[in-house]
Amino acid sequence: MREISSSIAYEIRTGDTLPLKVARSTKLRVHGGAVWVTRSDDTKDYWLQPGQTLHLRRGERLWLSAEGATFAKVAFSVPTRCDERALNWLARIGERWMMRVRGGWRTV
C-alpha cells in the first residue's frame, strides 16, 4: 500500500485498483475520467467525476478505481502546515528588509 505524504499525482487504468494510505490530511482532485473511492472507516463509497474533490483525513486508507472507457488521473495536494507558512512569511519579510538595508534608506 502506497503512502501519500506529499503532493503527487497518479494515473489509474480502467479496471485497476490503487490502494493508498493517507499520511497527512490532503485533498484529492479527479482529472480525465471518473473514479470510484472507497475509504476506511466510512460506510459510503464515493463516485467522483473529473473536477470534483474529496478532503481526506490523516491515517485513513483508500482504494481508488477508474471506471469507464478511459483512464483517470488523480492528484493529491497536501496543504502547507501552519508553522511552515509562518516561517515562509518571516523569510519573505527578512528578504525585503535586507533589500532595503542593502539598497540604503532613501528619503524623498
Image (spheres, rainbow, N blue to C red):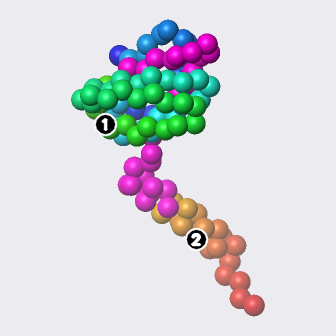
The local secondary structure at tag 1 comes to loop
Q: Earlier in the sequence, mark 2 or mark 1?
A: 1
Taking depth in this image into account, of 29 and 87 the one nearest to the observer is 29
Residue sitting farthest toward the left: 41
Q: Percent position (x, y) of residue 20?
A: 38, 22
Could you tell me if residue 70 is visible in this image?
A: yes
Check the image and name the residue furthest to the top.
15
Q: Quadrant of residue 69?
A: top right
- Magenta stretch encompasses residue 69: yes
Residue at 43 percent across and 37 percent down: it is 54
Q: Which residues are magenta?
A: 63-89
Residue 80: x and y in percent read 44, 48
Q: How many marks?
A: 2
Residue 97 disc label: 2
Q: Which residue type does callout 1 highlight?
A: Arg
Quadrant the C terminus occupies: bottom right
Q: Residues within 10 Å of mark 2 (few under 14, many from 20)?
A: few
Q: Secondary structure at mark 2?
A: helix
Q: CA distance from mark 2 to mark 1?
A: 38 Å
Residue type at mark 2 is Trp
